[in-house]
Amino acid sequence: MDHSIYLAMNGAAQTLRAQAENNANLANASTTGFKAELAAFKSVPVLGTGLATRVNAVESGNGFDASTGPQITTGRELDVAVQGQGWIAVQSPDGSEGYTRAGALQLTPEGLLTTAAGQPVLGDGGPISVPPHSSLKIGADGTVSVVPLGQPASAVASIGRIKLVNPAPADLSLGADGLMHLAGGATAPGDATVHLAAGVLEGSNVNPAEALVRMIALSRQFEMQVRGIKTADQNAQAATQLLSLN
């Protein structure tokens, strides 16, 4: 018997995977610094018996969209946006080094500089700790400067420099912690050509209209696969009845 029912079932399962990825992109259309995940279907030959026209459709990830999201001016001193290509180095929950473009930074009560998700921002010597201060400024090169509490405005002190990196996008992959990582747990060297803009945030590069259109297309594709399963099952039942009559 031809195995079209199994091919349709596999196609439906792969379409569900594509829907999950597309829905994740759509849900992060307003997430600061988010990079859309890319995926595509590819044809895989069917091994064994069956018609030569039968192929499996397999959904596979193609990395992420490295294009820059829109720049949103906030005026907040702890908001920064990477200009052009590059990433901010942070410490992931498991202690490894990860990379993000979500520049809505904040200070913990202990003075630790972190992302909005609570990941410590890394400097040249590890996580950056900010002492009590009356003002704070983040320079274009990532240098964090403060006026210590009780000191005049002219008493500016540099307390560290945010580690900025620029690995090739093809070398990065999205981890379960929502951060980008290099393969094998490697760390990228600092890159002095990467710059920040203070008082600005980078928005998500997800195009909501495109994601909605893709969601509708995938939904129709899933329905088509389900109809294919039903048709193949009906054909098999009809063939069985004909054989039983003989």
Image (tube, helix red, strand yellow):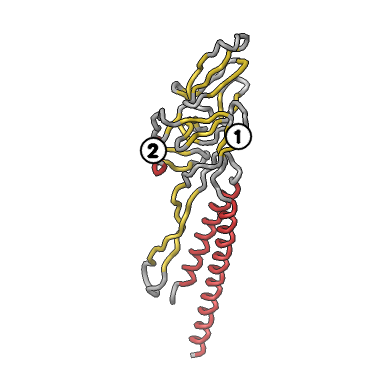
Residue drawn at x 49%, y 25% is 142
Residue drawn at x 59%, y 56% is 212
On the image, the x and y values in percent for residue 11 come to: 49, 64
- Residue at the bottom extreme, as displayed: 246
Viewer-nearest residue: 150 or 70: 70
Give above or below for 5 relative to 185. Answer: below
Give above or below for 197 relative to 110. Answer: below
Give above or below for 141 relative to 148. Answer: below
Report the amino acid beneath label 1: Thr
Tag 2 residue: 184
Q: Is residue 73 left or right of residue 41?
A: right
Disc 1: CA contacts within 10 A as few (<14), some (14-19) or many (>=20): some
Nearest to N terminus: mark 1 or mark 2 = 1
C-alpha span from label 1 to label 2: 36 Å
Tag 1 residue: 73
Which secondary structure lies at badge 1?
strand
On the image, the x and y values in percent for residue 65 come to: 48, 47
Give above or below for 146 relative to 246. Answer: above
